[in-house]
């Protein structure tokens, strides 16, 4: 079983995502144990304030180190591997997801506002992970993406009817999945490639290999035009 801890200002967002579809079934099957923690429960003031102004000046507010520290301490032996989602973190990839899927317990820390006191990163986490070179309004979004990518690699998460892990949309070399089609074979004069209708399995496999997209596909198709 995999255990996820989410330390968040909005645990209801996490609970909502894991309340339906495959993630919910993973909990029902005993594949995943989900634990959400409200960061404000560990504020050292009666108002539940967990952020403050930035030393040395700067706009916005930072989340304080103390609430994160106390929240992690409350987990005891069930803290596991701690991840902080951050735009400045290491790039999250399928290879990273596969490595994380070997761990029994993962705790996600989500940032907000202008970010998190650097001492959280320096003393409390095992790794900072980033989805890409852009900024989100909530670290919960990144935490959910990472947690989902890891969870689907856990044996038993998907049944045969729900999909297969044998052919990933992204492999470790970064090559993208080949195009896929379903019925009808012709729609609005847009045709499915003939080879996929041929029944010749060798030719179909060769076509799939030849038509796997490179990461530059959309850069060349859209960004550079």
Image: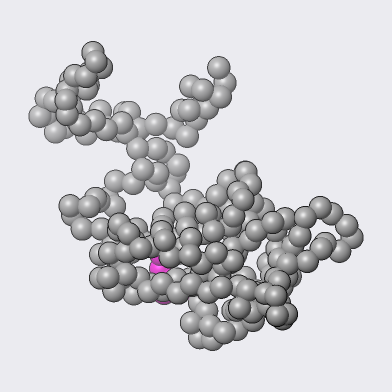
51 sits to left or right of 193 = right
At which x and y percent is residue 69?
Answer: 66, 78
Query: Does residue 213 appear in the picture of this structure?
Result: yes
In the foreground, 120 or 51: 51
At which x and y percent is residue 77?
Answer: 50, 86
Name the quadrant of the C terminus.
Answer: top right
Name the quadrant of the N terminus.
Answer: bottom left
* Span highlighted in magenta in the image: 101-105
Residue depicted at 25% across the width and 70% down the height = 29
At which x and y percent is residue 104?
Answer: 41, 74
Query: Does residue 95 appear in the picture of this structure?
Result: no
From the image, give the main secondary structure of the stretch colored magenta.
loop
57 sits to left or right of 46 = right
Does residue 169 sit above or below 80 in this rendering? above
- Residue lying furthest left: 199
> How is the model colour-coded?
one colour
Residue depicted at 10% across the width and 29% down the height = 199
At which x and y percent is residue 39?
Answer: 60, 72
In which quarter of the view is residue 62 placed? bottom right
Q: Is residue 5 magenta?
A: no
In the foreground, 179 or 35: 35
Does residue 97 sit above or below 168 in this rendering? below
Residue depicted at 24% across the width and 30% down the height = 181
In which quarter of the view is residue 30 placed? bottom left
Residue depicted at 44% across the width and 52% down the height = 94
Q: Is residue 102 magenta?
A: yes
- Residue lying furthest top: 189
- Residue lying furthest front: 47
Number of marks present in the image shown: 0
Does residue 61 sit above or below 47 in this rendering? above
């Amino acid at each position: 079983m995999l255990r996820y801890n989410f330390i968040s200002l909005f645990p209801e967002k996490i609970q909502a995502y894991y309340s339906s579809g495959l993630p919910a079934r993973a909990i029902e099957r005993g594949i995943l144990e989900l634990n959400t923690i409200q960061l404000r429960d560990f504020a050292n003031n009666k108002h539940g304030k967990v952020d403050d102004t930035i030393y040395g000046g700067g706009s916005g507010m930072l989340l304080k180190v103390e609430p994160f520290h106390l929240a992690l301490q409350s987990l005891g032996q069930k803290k596991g591997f701690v991840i902080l989602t951050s735009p400045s973190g290491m790039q999250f990839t399928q290879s990273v997801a596969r490595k994380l899927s070997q761990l029994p317990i993962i705790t996600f820390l989500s940032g907000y506002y202008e970010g998190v006191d650097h001492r959280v990163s320096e003393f409390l986490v095992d790794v900072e992970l980033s989805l890409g070179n852009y900024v989100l309004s909530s670290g919960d979004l990144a935490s959910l993406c990472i947690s989902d990518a890891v969870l689907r690699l856990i044996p038993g998460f998907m049944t045969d009817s729900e999909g297969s892990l044998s052919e990933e949309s992204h492999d470790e070399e970064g090559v993208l999945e080949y195009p896929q089609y379903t019925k009808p074979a012709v729609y609005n004069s847009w045709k499915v490639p003939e080879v996929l209708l041929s029944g010749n399995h060798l030719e179909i496999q060769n076509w799939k290999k030849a038509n796997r997209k490179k990461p530059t596909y959309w850069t060349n198709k859209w960004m550079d035009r």
